[in-house]
Image: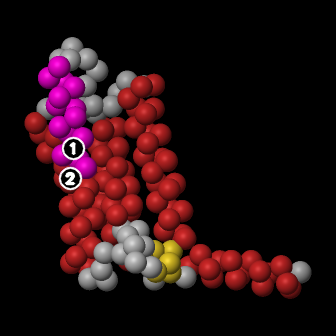
């Protein structure tokens, strides 16, 4: 029994220890969190859009944009950016904004070529979504400060 406990504790210690190399600066807990967050974000988007048909200009859109911003920020924070908060906060939030703008361009093109389709767009909704993506990425930064050694 004692040997089993030692092995369990050594595994948990390995998960807490950092993974540092040329490209990654993270630990296994943060990678696991990022994967689970990505799966949840993708699942919520797909269910809201294709099953419930309530995605575009509703409260679920607010939640999904916050969640996707947090996911993009969490993915970016796995990489070896810097230990400077100014730098990795700006890169994570900036990348969430870049992905958001690309998403809105794709939505706008879809709406332009198919105005009677499923996608609805509004200017203030787009502004709110941009803000929520940044807040989600900022939340990922705060969590990374606590989880990544």
With respect to residue 137, does 146 lie above or below? below
Give the residue pinned by disc 1: 102
Q: Quadrant of the C terminus?
A: bottom left
Residue at x-position 43% and y-position 42%: 42
Residue at x-position 35% and y-position 27%: 54
User: How is the protein colored in the picture?
Assistant: secondary structure
Give the residue pinned by disc 2: 98
Residue 22 visible in this rendered orientation of the protein: yes
Whether residue 104 is in magenta: the answer is yes
Viewer-closest of 67 and 93: 93
Viewer-closest of 101 and 132: 101
Left/right placement of residue 33 relative to residue 93 reads: right
Q: Specify few, some or many for label 2: CA neighbours under 10 Å numbering under 14, 14-19, or 20 or more.
A: some
Query: How many numbered badges does the structure rendering display?
Result: 2
Mark 2 lies on a secondary structure that is helix
Contact check, label 1 and label 2, Cβ < 8 Å: yes
Whether residue 111 is in magenta: the answer is yes
Q: Which residue appears farthest toward the left when viewing the image?
A: 123
Separation (CA) of disc 1 from disc 2: 6 Å
With respect to residue 49, does 116 lie above or below? above
Q: Position of residue 119 (x, y in %)?
A: 25, 25
Residue 121 visible in this rendered orientation of the protein: no
Q: Which residue appears farthest toward the right when viewing the image?
A: 1
| Image: magenta residue range | 98-113
Q: Quadrant of the N terminus?
A: bottom right
Residue at x-position 50% and y-position 56%: 35
Left/right placement of residue 47 relative to residue 13 reads: left
């Amino acid at each position: 029994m004692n040997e089993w406990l030692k092995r369990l504790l050594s595994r948990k210690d390995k998960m807490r220890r950092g993974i540092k190399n040329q490209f990654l600066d993270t630990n296994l807990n943060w990678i696991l969190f990022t994967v689970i967050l990505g799966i949840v974000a993708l699942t919520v988007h797909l269910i809201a859009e294709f099953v419930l048909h309530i995605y575009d200009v509703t409260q679920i859109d607010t939640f999904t944009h916050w969640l996707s911003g947090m996911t993009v920020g969490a993915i970016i924070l796995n990489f070896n950016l810097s230990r400077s908060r100014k730098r990795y906060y700006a890169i994570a939030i900036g990348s969430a904004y870049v992905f958001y703008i690309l998403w809105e361009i794709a939505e706008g093109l879809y709406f332009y070529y198919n105005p009677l389709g499923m996608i609805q767009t509004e200017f203030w909704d787009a502004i709110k979504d941009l803000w929520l993506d940044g807040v989600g990425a900022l939340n990922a930064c705060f969590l990374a400060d606590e989880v990544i050694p």
